[in-house]
């Protein structure tokens, strides 16, 4: 039975030519509407190729604006162009939510150069010494992207970044490691020492959210790569661009396109029509994707849960940050966690806003002091409460 199902599905006609071209991991050769930012990166990294001078840059922006794909595409080109000019440079892209400790980051750098390197049992300082020794001995250079670095700094503090930017100070040898930092919010720079902060602040690329016409251009490019000719209507592309433009999120737009194509295949249709998009939209809440919720720090989940519960209780359009802080303390008690101080609580609120999950409005009057008004994006609060409770359930003791 299952063998027949497998063969039937494999032999069925599909609107897709190559669905992988819609994956978040796919890096297209041409980045539509990111040419200017690519040119800026090229100018910043020109001294790396010409003068063997390390560089640091921060790429910041909200979800789905192309931060990761821009860094990956630039890294590919940088590596190729450097080697073409006699510089042995390689590019390494690490996600700090997966490699979330200093040890893991440095071990990945070692593995990048030698997968069989005997790094087990060694501390991060010794591992980094081995990295530097290897790079000097083999005259190699590295451009390292630390994706979601704001999360890493929040979790571990700034020591690793400080060390990477000063790794050769004592020896006087050239620093062979350039860094591309990716973050949703550049406010994490405040936690760095003044010199490191200054270095990144001089090279900040803030990526704006995509407009509807820009999203349409991106979708049109991917349709040409991912779908068979003539299977996606122009109205379908227009509708997806219009829906996704509310958040300026290309990743969500591409997810809608993929889901609409899957629905068309499931109905055995040879064309992806606007109604397939409407069905796809009903399957996902772009405002609060499960993957975004899963990646939140535990205390960020608790703050968001406190916000959600306040909305469920008040039925109003806004809740005050003061009420949310009190609710956060209650949630922390429920999950046997010690509440963070106000400054850290406010960092959590700002990061949740940076993810597009909430909006912050200034107080209506001076009498309200620092108490901001918080609004929640258009998502059922009951659904959001259940999702957060499921994610936090495993933390109960």
Image (cartoon, rainbow, N blue to C red):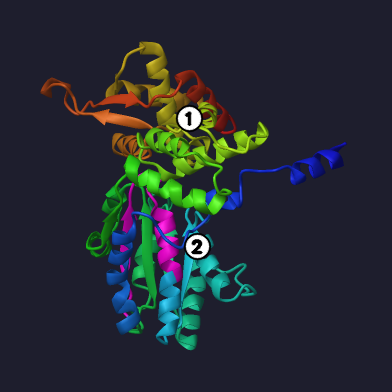
Check the image and report above or below for 2 versus 182: above
Q: Which circle marks residue 104 in the picture?
A: none
Quarter of the image where one finds residue 247: top left
Quarter of the image where one finds residue 266: top right
Judge depth for marks 1 and 2 and give the one in front.
Answer: 1
Q: Residue furthest right?
A: 1
Residue 339 visible in the current orientation = yes
Residue occupying the point 26% across, 58% down: 204
Check the image and report above or below for 347 versus 281: below
Q: Which residue is mark 1?
A: 285
Q: Which residue is mark 2?
A: 105
Q: Residue furthest left?
A: 366
**Residue 6 in the figure: left or right of residue 30:** right
Residue segment shown in magenta: 53-76
Check the image and report above or below for 8 versus 19: above
Judging from the image, what secondary structure is the residue with disc 2 in?
helix
Residue occupying the point 66% across, 43% down: 14
Q: Marks 1 and 2, how far apart in space?
A: 33 Å
Location of the C terminus (image quadrant): top right
Q: Nearer the viewer, residue 340 or 373?
A: 373
Q: Nearer the viewer, residue 305 or 397?
A: 305
């Amino acid at each position: 039975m299952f063998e027949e199902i497998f063969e039937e599905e494999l032999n069925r006609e599909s609107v897709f030519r190559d669905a992988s071209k819609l994956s978040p991991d796919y890096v297209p050769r041409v980045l539509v509407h990111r040419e200017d930012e690519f040119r800026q990166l090229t100018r910043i990294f020109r001294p790396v190729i010409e003068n063997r001078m390390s560089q640091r840059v921060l790429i910041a922006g909200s979800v789905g604006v192309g931060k990761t794909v821009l860094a990956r595409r630039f890294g590919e080109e940088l590596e190729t162009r450097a080697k073409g000019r006699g510089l042995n440079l390689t590019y390494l892209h690490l996600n700090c939510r997966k490699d979330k400790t200093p040890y893991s980051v440095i071990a990945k750098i070692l593995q990048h150069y030698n997968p069989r390197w005997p790094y087990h049992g060694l501390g991060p300082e010794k591992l980094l010494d081995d990295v530097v020794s290897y790079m000097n001995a083999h005259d190699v250079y590295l451009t390292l992207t630390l994706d979601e670095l704001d999360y890493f700094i929040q979790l571990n503090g700034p020591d690793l970044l400080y060390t990477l930017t000063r790794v050769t100070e004592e020896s006087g040898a050239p620093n062979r490691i350039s860094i591309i930092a990716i973050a949703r919010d550049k406010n994490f720079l405040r936690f760095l020492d003044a010199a490191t902060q200054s270095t990144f602040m001089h090279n900040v690329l803030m990526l704006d959210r995509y407009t509807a016409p820009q999203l349409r251009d991106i979708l049109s490019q991917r349709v040409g790569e991912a779908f068979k000719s003539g299977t996606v209507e122009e109205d379908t592309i227009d509708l997806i661009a219009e829906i996704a433009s509310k958040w300026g999120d290309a990743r969500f737009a591409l997810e809608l396109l993929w889901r609409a194509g899957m629905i068309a295949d499931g109905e055995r249709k040879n064309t992806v029509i606007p109604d397939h998009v409407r069905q796809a939209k009903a399957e996902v809440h772009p405002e609060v994707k499960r993957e975004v919720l899963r990646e939140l720090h535990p205390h960020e989940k608790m703050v968001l849960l406190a916000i959600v519960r306040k909305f469920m209780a008040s039925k109003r359009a806004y809740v005050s940050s003061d009420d949310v802080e009190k609710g956060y303390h209650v949630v922390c008690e429920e999950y046997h966690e010690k509440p963070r101080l106000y400054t850290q609580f406010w960092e959590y609120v700002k990061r949740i806003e940076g993810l597009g999950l909430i909006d912050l409005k200034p107080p209506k009057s001076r009498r309200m002091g620092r108490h901001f008004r918080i609004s929640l994006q258009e998502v059922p609060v009951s659904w959001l409460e259940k999702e957060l409770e499921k994610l936090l359930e495993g933390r109960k003791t």
